[in-house]
Structures are given as structure tokens and as C-alpha cells.
Amino acid sequence: MTAQELSDLLKIQQKAFTKSPPGYEQRMEALASLSEMVEKNQERLIEAVSQDFGHRSSEETTILELFPLHDEIKHARRHLKSWMKRKSVRSSWFLLPSTAYYQFQPLGSVGIMGAWNYQVLLTLSPLVDAIAAGNHAIIKPSEIAPASAEVIKDLINKTFDSSYIHCVTGNAELAKDFSSLPFDHLFFTGSTRVGKLIMEAAAPNLTPVTLELGGKSPAIIHESYDLELAAKRILAGKLFNAGQTCVAPDYLVMPVDLNDKFLGYSKQVVEKFYPDIANNKQYSYIISDKHFKRLTSLLEDAKQKGAKIIELCETNELPEGMMTPKLVIGVNDEMEIMQEEIFGPLLPVLNLESVEQAIEYVNANAKPLALYYFDDNQDRIDHLLKFTLSGGVTINDTIYHLAQHRLPFGGVGASGMGHYHGFDGFKTFSKKRAVMQQKKFGATDILHPPYTDIKKKLIGVMGDISKV
């Protein structure tokens, strides 16, 4: 699709929206159609995702993409009527007898750019929010996962009219043209580097953007916590999709005395999760040769600068595209593995002796998308929450805060801006519109010029009252 064709499509959608903004019934019907579309084509989507990765387990795609998507649609349909209701607020005393309320209204036609690591969920989940909010939408899945992108395109464009919801696919040049369109809102999921380019492209049109990015999300273990349980939960979050998850624990922080025990537990966990890993169909591959080489380069750089690479499972030959889980012990900030988001099954271990040192380290670096802390002491938990800032937090587990429909999901600083999921996603794609309705006689009439002596006295009384 050319830049002009994209522009024409957007104009068609915006015109259609202006003529008839989707109401409650149309939104409910569209959400139901989306759910039915995914349900009837689950196997096709699972197969396409696996094709993109060389291999990804059907179980992972089901529990990490399809189930959350269905559940999110169900949640939106269950609560949509209450989200759409106008909400009355108390009028300011000096504006009486006016009434005041706000209502959420759709923005128009929005653009959604998905991400390759969870192509189905990260393309269609924001679409759920956009539909619930009453918008028209053009979506673009990531070109890095072309098989799933084409399936999503085929399904979406057969399910919806192009003037309402349409999917386009293409290369990086199309992505550039896409992000330059004058959407009423632009939603992007991806890397911080590309997020900057998206924001730059959107700026000339003053298009508001939501950026769901990434970053280096730490997992911090207090020395008093059950280390075996921590290892199990950290590695579970790390090894889903072979570490190719934006909220995967990116590095581990703990006292050096815990290293040996953690290593022992980690090997046990990996053996339990993925026995005979080379032939285990529940362990996923790295998305491309380019990404595999990048991960290998991170390991080599760390090794040359003094880190110790420890395999967490024994194996001889591996299928092409598979990378086994590894701990990287003795890391420092000079290593590339501590400078960029890893997006693979490599877990650096940074040895700091106290929670205070961990807090200082987190605060000295870019704000992460997620933060994980393992401790049973509520005072220390509250202290860490007070003195750090991240997109989200899970205490004593990893990644699952993003599955809470009643919690917002989004980054802060370098890890993104804006939120989605549930009501927060509905708000992101809506305008919270303020409405004041004045009566036939209103106190505001007194404020009109000319300012007579009586009006001056009244204004003086207002000033005195406002100081109380």
C-alpha cells in the first residue's frame, strides 16, 4: 500500500466516523465479531506465529496471547455500558445553579502498530480498547513476523468494513508512512529506539501518541526470601517465549552469597520446565538469525569483559534458532548486556548487597517498564515502592501485573507513555469531555461588565471567600 493509499484510507475512515460515530450497540457487536474471529481461527493464528519464530509452542501462544485477548474482550463487553455513562460532578459554588458532568467520547480514526514478539495480542489488544471507546481504526502488525501479520490482515479485512476497521501490512517504509498520518491517536508497541522515531513522525500533525516500549526490568531478591521459589518465578517469567517479552526480568539483583544456591535452583527449574530442551516443543526459538546473532554478541562482549557464562541445561546439538537459558555472572555497566534490553533467555546477575544499593542502581538508570521485588517484609516493600518508579510492579512474582484488567499497563520515561487495558485503555482512546449546562438565570451573569460598585463589592466578597 502506497503512502497516498494510506492517506486516502484514513480520510475515508474519518469521514465515515464523522457521519456516524459508533454507539453502544455497534461497539458491542464489533467486539463480539472480533472475539468470534479469533476463536474460529485459533489454530491458524497459532501456526502462523510458530512459523514466524521457526517454532513457538502452541501452549505459549494460547496462554500468553489468545486467552488474555478473549478475556479482555469479555471484560470490555461486561463493563462498556458503565464506562460510557456520563458522570455528574458537583458544580462550583460561584457557577450555580449550573450543572456539570463529563462524558467519554471517541477520538475518531486511530492508528495501531503492533509488535512482533506477541503479534496477535499486541496488535489486537489495543484494538479492543479502540473499539470499546467507539473509534474507527487502521492497524499495522509488525513486518518482523510476516506470517502472523498476513493472517491478521486477512481475518480483520474479511470481518470488518474498511471504512471502520482495516489492517495493512508492509515493510519499514510503510511503517514510516503510517506513523506520519494525521491520526486522531497513534498507538505503538516496540523498542525505545523506534518509539522516538514514531513520536518524531507524529509531531508535525500534533498526533497524540501512546508508546508501549521496553527497557531493562530488574528482579530484586531480598536475602530473607525463599530463594527456590524466587528462582522458579523469575525463570518462568524470563523464559516465556525464550525471553522475548517486554516485561521479562531483564537482570537479577541479589547479594553475592546467594549466587551458588540460585544457580543450583535455576538448573533444577529449567530441567523441570523444559526436560530434554533440544527436543522440547514447549520451548520457543529466537525470532530471526539477526536477533540470534545480537544475543550471541552480547554474550561474547560480556565474556571478554570478565563475566562468566553459565549454561542452565546440558545439551549437545540444538535446532537452528534455539538458544538455551544462561546466567551471566559478574556483570558490570561496561558490558553491552547491561546497556540494552536483552530480549532473550540470558539473565545477568548483578551482585549488590542491600536493597538500598539496588534502589540506587535502578534510579541511576532509565525507568524500567516493570520492576520485580521478592520480599515478605511489607515495610521494605513499601520503601522500595516509594523510592523507585517503573511502569508497573509485581511483588513476589513476575510479569502477571499486566494480566490484571483493572490495572493500567504502560511505561514511564524511556519505557513509554500512556496506558491501556480495561478502563484505562478505554480512556486512552477517548476524550474525557467536560460539559457545563447553565440555567436561564446564572450567577455568571453578575460577572459581566460593566463593573458597577455593587458588582465590585460582590467580586470583593468572592475574593475574600476564595482565601478561606
Image (cartoon, rainbow, N blue to C red):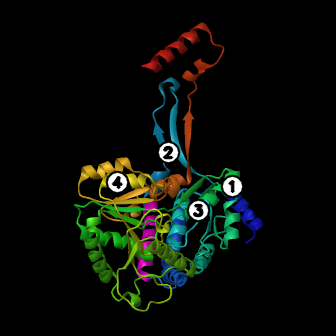
Tag on residue 86? 2
Calculate the distance from the C-alpha at mark 3 to the C-alpha at mark 2.
39 Å
> Closer to the N terminus: mark 4 or mark 1?
1
Q: Around disc 2, counting alpha carbons within 10 Å, would you say few (fewer than 14), some (14 to 19), or many (20 or more)?
A: some
Badge 2 element: loop
**Residue 173 quadrant:** bottom right
Q: Earlier in the sequence, mark 3 or mark 1?
A: 1
* Amino acid marked by disc 4: Gln
The residue at 40%/84% (across/down) is 282
Mark 1 and mark 4 in contact (Cβ < 8 Å)?
Answer: no
Name the N-terminal-most of marks 2 and 1: 1
- Residue 442 on image: x %, y %: 56, 23
Query: Horizontal and vertical percent for residue 378?
Result: 25, 52
Residue range highlighted in magenta: 57-77
Label number found at residue 193: 3
| Quadrant placement of the N terminus | bottom right
Q: Secondary structure at mark 4?
A: helix
In this rendering, the label closer to the viewer, 4 or 3: 4
Q: Between disc 2 and disc 4, whose residue precedes?
A: 2
| Mark closer to the chain start, 3 or 2 | 2
Q: Are marks 4 and 3 in contact (CB under 8 Å)?
A: no
Give residue 171's quadrant in the image.
bottom right
Task: Indicate the secondary structure of the residue bearing disc 3.
Answer: helix
Q: Residue at x 35, y 89 (%)?
A: 276
Query: For this view, does 57 lie left or right of residue 95?
Result: left
* Residue annotated with mark 4: 357
Residue placed under numbered mark 1 in the picture: 19
